[in-house]
Amino acid sequence: MRSSRPLVHEEVWIVALDVHDRARGARMISRGGLLSASVRPADVLRVALELGAVTFVMAHNHPGGDPAPSADDLLLTHEIEHAAHLIDVPLRDHVIVTPAGRFSSVFRAGSPR
């Protein structure tokens, strides 16, 4: 069981959605350090397919408290979005959350769409 203390490391998760935008399942993709977590588009898409996603949302946390996407976040989102389009399982959004409950949408913050 997870404690209610804020994470001191980054975690990357996906939520697989069905045709009605209902969650089919969620899974952690990567656990990293304070400043980053290593993620490859193939790792994300493999899990989306395993969960039977029609579309999916990716989420990760910024333990430092700033929900703004980094340049690396924007690049990763673009790479995953492109690869997901090729297999017809689109990325719906990439959300960044903080320990204080602040969040941002990478798509709304400037990811090339």
Image (tube, rainbow, N blue to C red):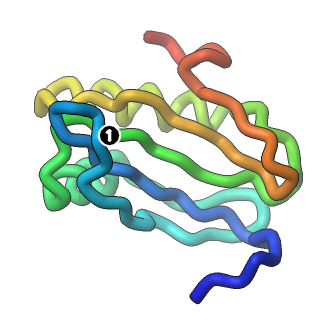
In depth, the one of 8 and 2 nearer the eye is 2
Q: Residue at x 27, y 42 (%)?
A: 17
Task: Give coordinates of residue 11: x percent, y percent.
Answer: 59, 64
Q: Residue at x 53, y 30 (%)?
A: 75
- Name the quadrant containing residue 51: bottom left
Q: Is residue 5 above or below residue 85?
A: below
Quarter the C terminus occupies = top left
Q: Can you name the residue that lies furthest to the top here? A: 113
Task: Give coordinates of residue 55: x percent, y percent.
Answer: 25, 35
Residue type marked 1: Phe
In depth, the one of 33 and 47 nearer the eye is 47
Q: Secondary structure at mark 1?
A: strand
Q: Is residue 24 above or below residue 95?
A: below
**Side of 102 relative to 53 (left or right):** right
- Circle 1 residue: 56
Task: Give coordinates of residue 29: x percent, y percent.
Answer: 42, 64
Q: Is residue 46 above or below residue 41?
A: below
Q: Is residue 29 above or below residue 103?
A: below
- Name the quadrant containing residue 8: bottom right
Circle 1 crowding by C-alpha within 10 Å: few under 14, some 14–19, many from 20? many
**Side of 32 relative to 66 (left or right):** left
> So how many labels did they put on this image?
1
Quarter the N terminus occupies = bottom right
- Name the quadrant containing residue 81: top left
